[in-house]
Image: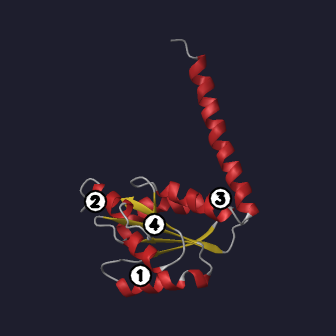
Amino acid sequence: MNVQSIQVGIIMGSKSDLPVMQDAVEVLKELGVGFEVTIVSAHRTPHRMFSYAEEAAARGIKVIIAGAGGAAHLPGMVASITHLPVIGVPVKSSNSIDGWDSVLSILQMPNGIPVATVALNAAKNAGILAAQIIATHDPEIAENLLAFKKILKDKVEETASEVEAMKF
């Protein structure tokens, strides 16, 4: 699998989000999608956030994955600045209200500022969705995704056969 140029920006509010966001990194590697990873805090480094969002498209980024916990303003704020698709990953953090504050902060965006939102801590799904968006114009990534989905299908069929062979 040949990794393409950097097409996905993975950003997070703090390094504490990295264990969750690592799942996006791993699936993008598996699918051959080029990416970059950095910290961009909406609250502590707003100028860095504005610069990142404004400059991403010019650097070849096609999709931004933004993970954040607690108040989780990063995905929505980035989406308000760029025309690129933004996928929000709500992160259950130490200062979180069981993750619900993060989910709702990302999910409840006003009309005109959409953020695709995956489940709590579901950075892997964010990576897959980013690859699917890129695959609409990249045949190699599309092929990689088809192979990935076939592996998922084969695993389910294998376990279904195992269960069906059990004596209940």
Q: Is residue 63 left or right of residue 91?
A: right
Mark toward the viewer: 4 or 3: 4
Residue with the mark numbered 2: 101
Q: Nearer the viewer, residue 88 or 31?
A: 88
Residue with the mark numbered 4: 114
User: Is there CB contact under 8 Å for labels 1 and 4?
Assistant: no
Is label 1 in a helix, a strand or a loop?
Answer: helix
Give whichever of discs 4 and 3 has the lower sequence position: 3
Is label 2 in a helix, a strand or a loop?
Answer: helix
Residue 124 image point, x, y percent: 51, 55
Name which quarter of the figure residue 113 lies in: bottom left
Give whichever of discs 1 and 4 has the lower sequence position: 1
Mark 2: give few (<14), some (14-19) or many (20+) Cα within 10 Å.
Answer: many
Mark 1: give few (<14), some (14-19) or many (20+) Cα within 10 Å.
Answer: many
Residue with the mark numbered 1: 49
Residue 15 image point, x, y percent: 38, 70
- Mark 1–mark 4 distance (CA, rounded to whole Å): 17 Å
> Residue shown at 39%/54% (left/top)?
120
Give whichever of discs 2 and 4 has the lower sequence position: 2
In the rendered image of this protein, does residue 152 appear above or below residue 115? above
Amino acid under label 4? Pro
- Mark 3–mark 1 distance (CA, rounded to whole Å): 27 Å
Q: Is residue 74 left or right of residue 158?
A: left
Identify the disc placed on residue 31.
Answer: 3
Amino acid under label 1? Met
In the rendered image of this protein, does residue 23 appear above or below residue 9? above
Name which quarter of the figure residue 76 lies in: bottom left
Amino acid under label 3? Leu
Residue 75 image point, x, y percent: 41, 70
